Amino acid sequence: MNTAKLAPLFANEDKAIEFVESLMWPDGPVCPHCGGLEKAYKIKANPEKKVRHGLWKCGHCRKQFTVRIGSIFEDSKIPMKIWLLIISQMCSAKKGVSATQIQRMTGLSYKAAWFACHRIREAMKQEPLLSKLGSGGGIVEADETYIGGKARNNRHKGRKPPKKTAVLTLIERDGQVRTFKIPNTRKGTLQTIIRPVVDRSAVIMTDESRSYEGLDDHFTAHHAVNHSETFVRGMIIHTKFRRVISLPTQALDHRHASSH
């Protein structure tokens, strides 16, 4: 990593935030609360009124947000320019960087330096997104679930069972699979993950959850499945669809023999 080219980002918080926004939102800001795109506007920073740098407000749900939400920078008071400095050092050091070295370099407390290093290392463990799912008009299925055992199977008697973990999985037909741990299954959360990962030419298949409504505005087609009615439509669809948009009709004509 060429730290000389990034030097201006280490000195200016606004430039550092704009740089991260350009990476996270290449097509413009995305509201993490409702998934809104078109009506977000920036709020000017004002330290006297405690208005932080990089603050946006969504014109759809009227909630405020920053590019930190949903990233390793979330729930952190460390300035973005310091985050970028730490990342550049960790990526360029041949033998690694310790938290104490980051502490001396940035002036952070040891606790804050340790926290930043561990978050960055955790992000480094994830596989890079080399290509988007569904490129070239492929089919991508999306579904969410909760992982965790039943309370009666909890071996620690008398203890409250741990909360189940929500996960979202995106899978290509005969292709890649990507799974994300998510804080909730709301529309803003799911669609903020799906849109950057899935190619716009893809066909999206989901269940009838309202969290997926509006995906047809961003992809070639979106099909919502009704799991309570089982049919077979060719080799593409194996459940009845509430809404069908732009798939060849000849692939959708055959019902399961049990329905006759």
Image (spheres, helix red, strand yellow):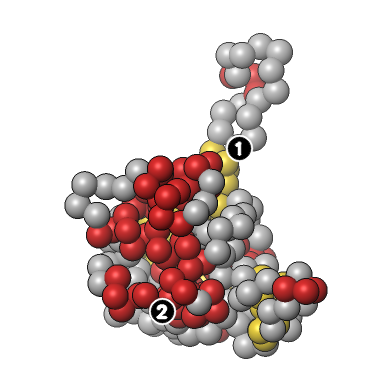
Q: Is residue 108 visible to us here?
A: yes
- Percent across and percent down for residue 108 are 52, 51
Nearer the observer, 121 or 108: 108
Give the left or right position of residue 160, taking residue 105 as reference.
right
Q: Residue at x 56, y 70 (%)?
A: 67
Give the left or right position of residue 58, taking residue 106 as reference.
right
Q: Is residue 258 visible to us here?
A: no
The residue labelled by disc 2 is 8
| Mark 1 neighbour class, 10 Å CA radius: few under 14, some 14 to 19, many 20 or more | few
Amino acid type of the residue tagged 1 in the rendering: Lys
- Percent across and percent down for residue 142 are 48, 61
Q: Residue furthest top?
A: 157
Q: In the drawing, what numbered circle is on residue 129? A: none
- Percent across and percent down for residue 183 are 61, 51
- Badge 1 element: loop
Q: Residue at x 43, y 75 (%)?
A: 9
Q: Residue at x 32, y 58 (%)?
A: 89
The residue labelled by disc 1 is 164
Name the N-terminal-most of marks 2 and 1: 2
Where's the N terminus, which quadrant?
bottom left
Q: Residue at x 19, y 52 (%)?
A: 94
- Residue depth check, mark 2 versus mark 1: number of the one nearer the observer: 2
Nearer the observer, 128 or 106: 106
